[in-house]
């Protein structure tokens, strides 16, 4: 692509996609789920082009989104009475009427393979899970049939098809939408493109490293014909004179004007090793794990820390210990260097308020002291024992009420040691809840507003009123970003420059799409505002006052580890609405502002691509059942995790259930037992 074409695309990128597109895709006729053994594909595929009353013996049903009838999406797992264990297929179709021929730009998110048909002809096909797919469909005058075919293997089964722009009736409208889609693809792909040393984050000392983008063609399209400038610094951010010593180095990548007309910066960390480090037998053994794969790959996701982690591994030789060593990549000297060279306004976080009457702290006690029925701890233990026997995954569980721990026990071993209250386990997405807790005092002290324009501490963000990025949208997943470590994540102190280029393509406030980019941005926002690393903010404000010792990490989307007892302390802090012991960390009003809100009320017309939190989300907190539902059972709040670590608190009945674990190898079993333990705790509450 030459610069003239890219310049035209850049103009399209700055244009506004049509707002308020009306093409509802929330009511379908659905057939399925059809087990593979009963599927006669040639017969079933007739449904893609014509109406049928039954398909392969399965009656066609009228479908309306079970969570919200006005929201696009096919959530098969919640609609069908029975999902076969074996491979199965579902079909869905709806009709839309057009007054003239036109084109629409569509977006598709799916958990499994999907084929989209328009009037019987395949329009788009993708392999799932696949998100953010953009494609055009052409409609004729009159009725048009939109049909979907999707197989199911195992797990969550959903397809969300939405209109992004249209109707497009003129050649210029189509060209501009095509250009917008092209740029969205380039920038979105570049958000996961990283410069590496021969595919590694480690190189050999003695010479200046040669960086190559993992997707060189994508980088060329992003930057244009002129490559970006690269400047090297040592670990103290002093300009690099030579590369003889072993250690940490930083590469500053700058382009004053990318192919899309805006500046770009990034700072990436690399570690140089002496001699023929690749020949070391331990390096050979883990070479594949060192390569960048995807955000949740345990070793490669923390690529900014890989050099230091590798050094620890070589010195200590303990892979399990290495997996638990989280050292924040954003150091004080990096933030000082950024502030010195790219200054922004800064604020100072005041210490917590010391209370005359201390709030409840966790302590061990009896069921009667906690307000549970006698013998409840035995029932809790029996259920946890069954859970461990069926899942064969080690975990540690704490159950408490009114600040009194009645059950605290682990099953199994991790790294050769029995599970304990202080065994560090992966928190995965519970990390997002930690970010919200850290943000609470900033809200409480009036330092940062949930709805402020984020150019305040990130002037690189090129917002418009239509695409405004705010802290609230970063926390509640309406910022519309995809992924968890894009543009280098929190470890790239200039990730906001990449986000500024991405913003026009994601259009914050138009869709609810679960991601880790927003929480990472909020941690960066707090760091820039205070000039303090995020781990130091946690340590100074909370951890040393509460006695938290196991929580470590820096990636807010899913990179923290913690022990069950420290999780429980934070759960009690939330049950106390911002206080713990002699300290009030934030007010009850701020606690209320953190709790989940109805996203559709805050964002009229919002597309709920992600719906498992029932359309309600707060500042790092989501509900575990529908808060709008009519039930006398408790509503637990907190956050889920990919490892199935559990963080649940019920503010009405003052109960908590926390569980630290490192793996979710048996999701169906874990789901079953989490519901059972919630039910058991509810039934165990003594009559008031």
Image (cartoon, helix red, strand yellow):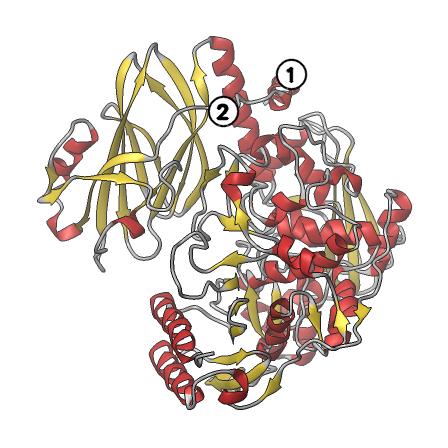
Instruction: Measure the C-alpha gap from mark 2 to mark 1.
Output: 31 Å
Q: Secondary structure at mark 1?
A: helix
Circle 1 is placed at which residue position?
4
Looking at the image, residue 496 lies above or below residue 595: above
What label sits on residue 114 in the rendered view?
Answer: none
| Horizontal side, residue 54 vs residue 71: left or right | left
Which residue does the image show at 66% across and 72% down from the upper left? Answer: 551
Task: Assess whether mark 1 and mark 2 are in contact (beta carbons under 8 angstroms).
Answer: no
Q: Is residue 229 visible?
A: no
The 10 Å Cα crowd at callout 2, few under 14, some 14 to 19, many 20 or more, is some
Q: Name the element at disc 2.
A: loop
* Residue drawn where x is 49% and y is 36% of the image: 606
Question: Could you say which is closer to the camera, residue 591 or residue 263?
Answer: 591
Query: Residue 32's spot in the image, x, y percent?
Result: 19, 45
* Left or right: residue 57 compared with residue 412: left
Q: Residue at x 24, y 23 (%)?
A: 119
Q: Residue at x 72, y 31 (%)?
A: 462
Vertically, is 172 above or below 277? above
Q: Quadrant of residue 471?
A: top right
Question: Which of the two residues, 578 or 615, is positioned nearer the viewer here?
Answer: 578
Q: Is residue 289 visible?
A: yes
Residue 169: x, y in percent?
43, 11
- Position of residue 387 measured from the top left corner of the image (x, y, whole percent): 37, 79
Camera-side mark, 2 or 1: 2
187 over 675 or under it: above or below: above
Q: Which residue is mark 2?
A: 20
Q: Earlier in the sequence, mark 2 or mark 1?
A: 1
- Residue 27 coordinates in the image, percent (x, y): 30, 34
Q: Would you call the spot at circle 1 few (<14 residues within 10 Å), some (14-19), or many (20 or more)?
A: few
Question: Quadrant where the N terminus lies?
Answer: top right
């Amino acid at each position: 692509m030459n610069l003239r074409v890219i310049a035209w695309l850049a103009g399209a990128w700055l244009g506004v996609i049509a707002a308020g597109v009306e093409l509802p895709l929330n009511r379908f006729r659905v057939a399925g789920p059809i087990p593979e053994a009963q599927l006669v594909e040639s017969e079933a595929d007739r449904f893609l082009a014509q109406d049928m009353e039954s398909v392969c013996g399965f009656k066609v049903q009228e479908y309306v989104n079970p969570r919200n009838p006005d929201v696009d999406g096919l959530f098969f797992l919640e609609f069908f009475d029975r999902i076969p264990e074996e491979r199965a297929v579902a079909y869905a179709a709806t009709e839309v009427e057009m007054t003239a021929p036109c084109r629409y730009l569509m977006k598709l998110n799916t958990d499994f393979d999907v084929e989209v048909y328009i009037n019987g002809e395949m329009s788009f096909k993708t392999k799932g899970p696949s998100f953010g797919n953009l494609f055009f469909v052409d409609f004729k005058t009159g009725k048009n049939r939109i049909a979907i075919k999707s197989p199911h293997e195992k797990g969550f089964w959903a397809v969300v098809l939405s209109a992004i722009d249209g109707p497009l009736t003129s050649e210029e409208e189509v060209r501009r939408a095509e250009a917008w889609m092209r740029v969205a693809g380039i920038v979105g792909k570049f958000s996961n493109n990283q410069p590496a040393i021969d595919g590694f984050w480690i190189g050999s000392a003695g010479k200046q490293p040669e960086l190559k983008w993992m997707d060189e063609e994508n980088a060329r399209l992003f930057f244009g014909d002129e490559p970006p400038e690269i400047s090297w610094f040592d670990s103290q951010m002093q300009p690099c004179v030579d590369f003889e010593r072993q250690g940490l180095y930083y590469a500053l990548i700058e382009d004053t004007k990318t192919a899309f007309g805006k500046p770009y910066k990034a700072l990436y960390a690399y570690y140089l090793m002496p001699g023929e480090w690749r020949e070391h037998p331990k390096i050979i053994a883990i070479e594949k794990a060192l390569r960048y794969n995807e955000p949740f790959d345990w070793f490669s996701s923390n690529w900014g820390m890989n050099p230091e982690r590798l050094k620890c591994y070589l010195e200590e030789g303990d892979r399990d210990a290495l997996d638990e060593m989280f050292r924040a990549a954003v150091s004080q000297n990096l933030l000082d260097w950024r502030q010195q060279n790219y200054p922004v306004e800064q604020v100072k976080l005041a210490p917590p308020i010391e209370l005359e009457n201390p709030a409840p702290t966790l302590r061990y006690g009896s069921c009667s002291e906690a307000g549970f029925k006698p013998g409840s701890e035995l029932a809790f233990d029996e259920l946890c024992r069954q859970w461990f026997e069926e899942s064969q995954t080690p975990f540690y569980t704490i159950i408490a009420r009114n600040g009194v721990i009645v059950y605290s026990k682990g099953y199994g071993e991790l790294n050769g040691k029995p599970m304990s209250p202080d065994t560090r386990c992966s928190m995965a997405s519970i990390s997002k809840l930690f970010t919200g807790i850290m943000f609470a005092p900033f809200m409480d002290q009036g330092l940062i507003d949930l709805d402020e324009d984020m150019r305040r501490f990130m002037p690189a963000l090129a917002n418009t009123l239509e695409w405004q990025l705010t802290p609230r949208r970063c926390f509640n997943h309406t910022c519309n970003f995809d992924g968890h470590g894009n543009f280098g994540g929190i470890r790239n102190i200039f990730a906001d420059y990449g986000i500024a280029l991405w913003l026009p393509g994601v259009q914050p406030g138009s869709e609810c799409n679960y991601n880790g980019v927003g929480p990472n941005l909020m941690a960066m926002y707090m760091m820039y505002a205070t000039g303090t690393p995020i781990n130091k903010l946690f340590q100074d404000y909370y951890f040393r006052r509460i006695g938290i010792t196991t929580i470590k990490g820096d990636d807010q989307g899913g990179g923290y580890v913690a022990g069950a007892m420290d999780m429980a302390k934070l759960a009690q802090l939330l049950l106390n609405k911002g206080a713990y012991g002699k300290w009030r960390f934030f007010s009850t009003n701020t606690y209320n502002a953190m709790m989940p809100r109805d996203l559709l009320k805050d964002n009229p017309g919002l597309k709920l691509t992600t719906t498992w939190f029932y359309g309600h989300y707060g500042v790092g907190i989501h509900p575990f059942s529908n808060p709008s539902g009519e039930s006398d059972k408790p509503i637990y709040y907190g956050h889920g995790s990919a490892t199935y670590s559990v963080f649940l608190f019920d503010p009405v009945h003052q109960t908590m259930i926390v569980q630290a674990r490192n793996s979710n190898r048996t999701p169906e079993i874990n789901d079953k037992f989490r519901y059972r333990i919630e039910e058991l705790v509810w039934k165990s509450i003594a009559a008031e």
